[in-house]
Amino acid sequence: MSESHTPAGGSARLNTGVAHNARVWNYWIGGKDNYEVDQRVGEHVATMFPLIRDIARADRDFLGRAVRFLAEGRGVRQFLDIGTGLPTADNTHEIAQRVAPDARIVYVDNDPIVLVHARTLLTGSHDGVTDYIDADVHDPQAILERAARTLDFTRPVAVMMLGILNFVLDTEKALDIVRGIMTAVPSGSFLVLTHPTFEADLGGEGQIPAMEFWNENATPPITARSRADIAAFFDGLELLEPGLVSCAQWRAEPDSPAPVPQFGAVAVKP
């Protein structure tokens, strides 16, 4: 079953003349839903910071491991995926509903090209529900109100925030967003988060000039954060093993790829 709570005029915001994160990210992971401007900016960023493609792949692989772990190991049946990006293979609902066909997933994004693809591609299992809402991470109250049409906030929810808080430039605002959403979900809920870092031990120094170029030539603007700032998003929650690590290494196989400068972690609300 699939539902959509989206305004019909979303496509009016589509601007194909400026590189956009959802489309450039799609380009980096080998997708086809991007334009020449996205490819041009994506190539330039990759030239400046070659690790970016590894980060994109590692982030996507982290999503798969985290959703499988929560659906199989923790019995999670509700997922709120904020900043989903363009649909590719093995989206959150596909992974969760393979484990539990009755799982309910709500995707959140505010990019019109994501909206167009979500309407056609993010269709769930017969027993479960896959919904898409057009909302901005800067407005968590709107996200919660619309998601409540599909999700039961008296039962645990896995809140997925992969590579999205880096578009909230003010750290205090980003912390408030996380606190507000996690306050609204019950005990036993989870926060699943990835975030780019400039920490040198993960090879993150190159993020800074690459992000400066991005902010001058693409949208939306982005920021990296320190390990301590990213750890603060989990205040009041209990980090699951192995804690806050490179997303490439979170519950990965022994022969997993090298670490990338993108932290990832999963925490439970006590």
Image: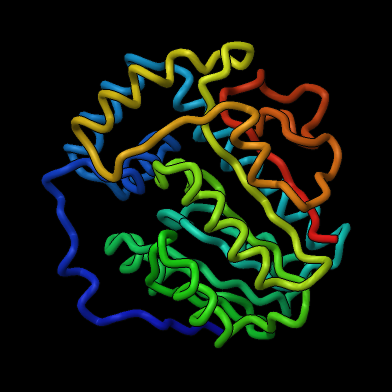
- Residue name at image x 15 percent, y 54 percent: 15
Quarter of the picture containing the N terminus is bottom right
Name the foreground residue: 123 vs 200: 200
- Residue name at image x 83 percent, y 34 percent: 242
Q: Is residue 193 above or below residue 251?
A: below
Residue 217, quarter of the rendered image: top left
Q: Position of residue 154 (x, y in %)?
A: 75, 82
- Residue name at image x 77 percent, y 22 percent: 255
Q: Position of residue 198 (x, y in %)?
A: 51, 21
- Residue name at image x 58 percent, y 83 percent: 148
Residue 269, quarter of the rendered image: bottom right
Q: Position of residue 260 (x, y in %)?
A: 59, 23
Name the foreground residue: 40 vs 7: 7
Task: Please count the marks in the image.
Answer: 0
Q: In the image, is 12 to the left or to the right of 214?
A: left
Residue 21, quarter of the rendered image: top left
Q: Is residue 71 above or below residue 57?
A: below
